[in-house]
């Protein structure tokens, strides 16, 4: 038994090392900006502005290999990494990879976005050509959400789509997008498929011992409204409660308007100035990194839900975590996740309501230890705790040594 545990731990460490190879800071959760600073706006100051928002790695389309080189040089000055994306990466991958593989700002290599399963074989061959030259930086590819139709997926079901991808394309982590907050005449609501999407991705990720990265929407377009702070928190903290090891934003820079999408109010707006959304993601990114000591490289033990109704595809909380006598939640419902890191278990509770606060009462068999939003441990010196969790917000408790129980 101990031998099997040792082998499992070694495999996890090796997988984690491969995942974060090339990323300068491995003590914090990677925070990724899709649609970063465009080539024509590239400067060290713009990347410094991005870094100040909490972004650590970014992806922007570059029209030429020389433009990509210039962008990497500017990003290096600010301490931000970029995903290499230029036409030459596809037409001449070996030469392009050799040019950028030793650049300090190189974070990885972009393949494509939301491909059909029909393209997986060719993408796998392309990724292998890149990896044959540079095995230290990851290939990046982002999957469709589960509300895509079979004609888009290229498979009969979403789970088959994810499984086919895992079997065909050699990437160190899964990435998928799903933007759950939509607005119509009835107001704002969550897509009913969102949590089922997280369940499938987290489950397939666990089967393959590969982490996953997930998105939060940060630019308004179509049915998607300008996000509130609570909506961004809910997306981010739900992803993390399910075990996400990277958080991505779509987008950072507001794309030039297209008639069918009408993008507006991204973190950097149409006037190239910061918007209120910039301040929101900076706030949330600071909260993410304050909790990185717990969330980064943690293992998901369980993820369950409470509430009169629970989301499709999820499990209702049936058994309390070890050492907890009672959990009372007054509100729409919550995600209750148990994570383990270095032999220590934590209970992560996320308010699923992005409009109203939720009252949480916990009773334990010993004194409670709550992790504050700044990452410090607070011993309440009491056996119970009653707190209000804001809309979409998170509460974290350490479970070890409750009633003498140790999980090491």
Image: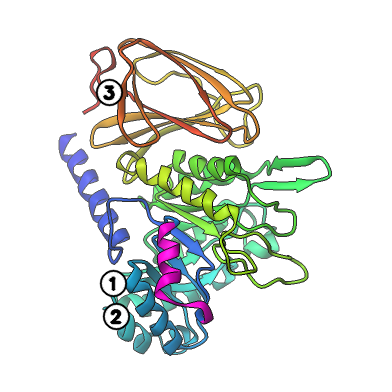
> Is 263 rendered above or below residue 124?
above
Q: Secondary structure at mark 2?
A: helix
Overall secondary structure of the magenta section: helix
Bounds of the magenta segment: 40-52
Residue 211: assigned label: none
- Asked whether residue 158 appears in the rendered view, the answer is yes
Badge 3, how many Cα within 10 Å: few under 14, some, many 20+?
Answer: many
Depth check, mark 3 against mark 2: the one in front is 3
What element does badge 1 sit on? loop
Question: Residue 133's mark?
Answer: 2
Q: In the image, is 273 to the left or to the right of 47?
A: right
Query: Label 2, label 1: how many angstroms apart (C-alpha)?
Result: 7 Å
Kindly report which numbered mark, 1 or 3, lies closer to the viewer in this rendering: 3
**Where is the N terminus found, in terms of image quarters?**
top left
Rendered location of residue 245, percent (x, y) = 39, 50
Give me the disc on residue 135. 1
Q: Is residue 217 visible?
A: no
Q: Are marks 1 and 3 in contact (CB under 8 Å)?
A: no
Viewer-proximal residue among 367 and 318? 367
Q: How is the image coloured?
A: rainbow
Q: Which residue is mark 3?
A: 400
The numbered mark, 1 or 3, whose residue comes first in the sequence reads 1
User: Mark 3 or 2 closer to N-term?
Assistant: 2
User: Which residue is located at x 54 percent, y 68 percent?
Assistant: 35
Distance from label 3 to label 2 (Cα)? 45 Å
Residue 266 coordinates in the image, percent (x, y): 61, 60
Q: CA distance from mark 1 to mark 3?
A: 38 Å
Q: Residue at x 44, y 49 (%)?
A: 285
């Amino acid at each position: 038994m101990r031998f099997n545990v040792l082998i499992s731990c070694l495999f996890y460490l090796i997988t984690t090392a491969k995942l974060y190879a090339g990323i300068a800071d491995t003590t914090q959760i990677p925070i990724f900006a899709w649609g970063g600073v465009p080539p024509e706006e590239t400067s060290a100051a713009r990347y410094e502005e991005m870094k100040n928002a909490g972004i650590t790695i970014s992806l922007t389309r570059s029209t030429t290999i020389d433009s990509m080189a210039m962008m990497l040089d500017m990003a290096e000055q600010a301490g931000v990494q970029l995903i290499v994306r230029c036409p030459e990466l596809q037409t001449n991958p070996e030469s392009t990879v050799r040019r950028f593989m030793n650049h300090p700002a190189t974070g990885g290599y972009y393949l494509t976005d939301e491909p059909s399963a029909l393209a997986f074989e060719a993408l796998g061959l392309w990724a292998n050509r890149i990896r044959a030259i540079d095995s230290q930086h990851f290939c990046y590819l982002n999957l469709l959400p589960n509300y895509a139709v079979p004609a888009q997926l290229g498979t009969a079901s979403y789970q088959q789509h994810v499984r086919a991808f895992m079997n065909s394309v050699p990437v160190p982590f899964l990435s998928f997008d799903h933007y759950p907050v939509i607005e119509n005449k009835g107001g704002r609501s969550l897509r009913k498929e969102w949590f089922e999407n997280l369940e499938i991705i987290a489950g397939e990720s666990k089967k393959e011992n590969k982490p996953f990265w997930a998105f939060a929407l940060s630019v308004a377009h179509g049915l998607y409204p300008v996000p509130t702070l609570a909506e961004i928190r809910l997306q981010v903290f739900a992803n993390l409660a399910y075990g996400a090891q990277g958080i991505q934003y779509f987008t950072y820079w507001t794309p030039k308007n297209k008639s069918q999408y009408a993008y507006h109010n991204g973190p950097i707006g149409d006037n190239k100035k910061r918007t209120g959304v910039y301040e929101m993601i900076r706030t949330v990114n600071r909260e993410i990194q304050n909790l990185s000591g717990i969330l980064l490289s943690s293992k998901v033990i369980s993820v369950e839900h409470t509430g009169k109704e629970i989301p499709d595809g999820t499990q209702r909380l049936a058994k309390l975590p070890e050492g907890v006598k009672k959990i009372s939640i007054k509100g729409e419902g919550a995600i209750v996740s148990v994570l383990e890191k270095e032999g220590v278990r934590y209970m992560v509770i996320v308010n699923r309501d992005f409009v109203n606060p939720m009252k949480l009462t916990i009773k334990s068999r010993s004194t409670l230890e709550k992790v504050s939003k700044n990452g410090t441990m607070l011993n309440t010196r009491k056996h119970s705790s009653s707190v209000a969790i804001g809309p979409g917000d998170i509460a974290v408790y350490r479970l070890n040594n409750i009633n003498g129980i140790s999980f090491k």
